[in-house]
Amino acid sequence: MNDFWNQIILNNPVKRYFFVAGAILIGLLFKRLISRSIGKFLHSLVKRMAPRVDRASFLDLITRPLEIFLVFLITIISLEKLNFPEALNFDIYEISFKTILQAFAKILVVASFFWLLLRIIDFVALLLEWKANATPDQRDNQLIIFFRDFIKVVTIIIGIMTILSRAFRIELSSAWTGLGIAGAAIALSTKESIENLIASFIIFFDKPFTPGDVLKVNNITGTVEKIGLRSTRIRTELKTYVTVPNKQMVDSIVDNQTLRTQRKAELRLQISLLTPAVKH
């Protein structure tokens, strides 16, 4: 029996394969239990700041990405205990197969971790939205959505930079230099998008209008439904959905009809020509 356990297959004894497979199997069996336990612990920390937070909503947001992150992490840590087989030690386009596998594993772990961060950002935004709903001013709700999307974009960029650094071993300094050169070219080609992004900040801080206001801009009259990073969505009187770039919303003359203090009304009375001058 000992000869079987000590038998070498692909540069590793059989017993080591069983240990690794057992660790991965335990991770798969208990991933939900472990993730929910970690989720409940995180919920207890969040609950101290917000006593009314719903635990079910919190667990629904983070349990799935946490499970995937734990499975990838346990699998990669377990596989690291194995010696890389010599039979698989070959190159693909001058890159060793081992390096490709390691890069792929790091991409999975980093991507799942940042997916978990995005879910946490969604929950924090949901928590702030619950608090904003308690106030009569609805401008806070749109501001939360705006900054949620903005922070998620920044998080995704950081995640991509982390993958480039960890998986592809690219120096961040050289990457930032390359991004600076590429960013200049992209900035020129996406000039309007950048202007719309800046205009969105102007709208949120200057607050010439908010979601729910009735506006008239560029011969378009309707109700503002959403203010995004690039454009403002307006529902017209004909129930059509119009998307107006934020730069036009800032540069154009916007008539906020919701903020008018008085409304002009005309009442026309038409009298028939056969109406007698004196009542009989």
Image (tube, grey):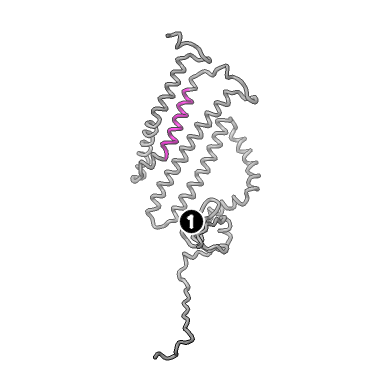
92 part of magenta stretch: no
65 part of magenta stretch: yes
Query: Relative to residue 11, is residue 41 depicted above or below?
Result: below
Type of secondary structure dominating the magenta stretch: helix
Q: Is residue 25 left or right of residue 235?
A: left
* Quadrant the C terminus occupies: bottom left
Q: What is the x, y in percent for residue 137? A: 41, 57
Q: What is the x, y in percent for residue 134? A: 37, 53
Q: What is the x, y in percent for residue 100? A: 58, 26
Highlighted range, magenta: 61-78
Instruction: State the residue position of label 1.
Output: 225
Q: Residues within 10 Å of mark 1 (few under 14, many from 20)?
A: some
Q: Residue at the location (52% across, 28% down)?
A: 105
| Amino acid at circle 1 | Glu
Q: Is residue 159 visible?
A: yes
In the foreground, 254 or 171: 254
